[in-house]
Image (cartoon, rainbow, N blue to C red):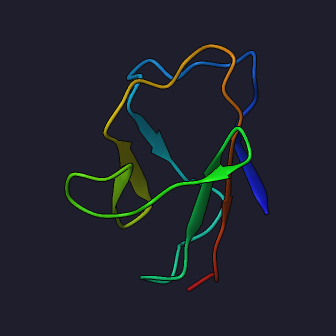
């Protein structure tokens, strides 16, 4: 489990977060925002391309975002 965003840190693009600590093996990630698992796919909570996660909504100041994944 890796913390991608603490409550006090907001990315400059409020919809995009990039994992920089490792390479994510395709289709192994689980993304959690404030403890709730997010659904991947077009029209759902987020999409992923490589190590870049794009949310379908703005990330808020108080949000905590965690990801679990298998390293490539």
The residue lying toward the viewer, choosing from 9 and 57, is 57
Q: Quadrant of residue 5?
A: top right
Q: Residue 38, image x and y in percent?
A: 51, 55
The residue lying toward the viewer, choosing from 7 and 36, is 36
Q: In which quadrant of the rendered image does the N terminus lie?
A: bottom right
Q: Residue 6, image x and y in percent?
A: 75, 29
Task: Please tell me how many numbered marks the rendered image carries.
Answer: 0
Q: Is residue 69 above or below residue 33?
A: below
- Residue beneath the point at 31% across and 39% down: 56
Q: Is residue 59 above or below residue 34?
A: above
Q: Is residue 11 above or below residue 66?
A: above
Q: Residue 46, image x and y in percent?
A: 37, 51
Horizontal side of residue 7 vs 72, given as left or right: right
- Residue beneath the point at 64% across and 83% down: 70
Q: Quadrant of residue 30?
A: bottom right
Q: Residue 2, image x and y in percent?
A: 76, 56
- Residue beneath the point at 55% across and 86% down: 72
Horizontal side of residue 50 vs 72, given as left or right: left
């Amino acid at each position: 489990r890796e913390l991608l965003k603490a409550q006090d840190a907001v990315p400059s693009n409020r919809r995009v977060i990039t994992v920089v600590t490792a390479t994510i093996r395709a289709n192994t990630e689980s993304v959690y925002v404030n403890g709730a698992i997010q659904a991947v796919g077009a029209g759902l909570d987020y999409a992923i391309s490589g190590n870049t996660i794009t949310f379908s909504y703005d990330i808020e100041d108080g949000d905590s975002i965690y990801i679990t994944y298998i390293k490539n």
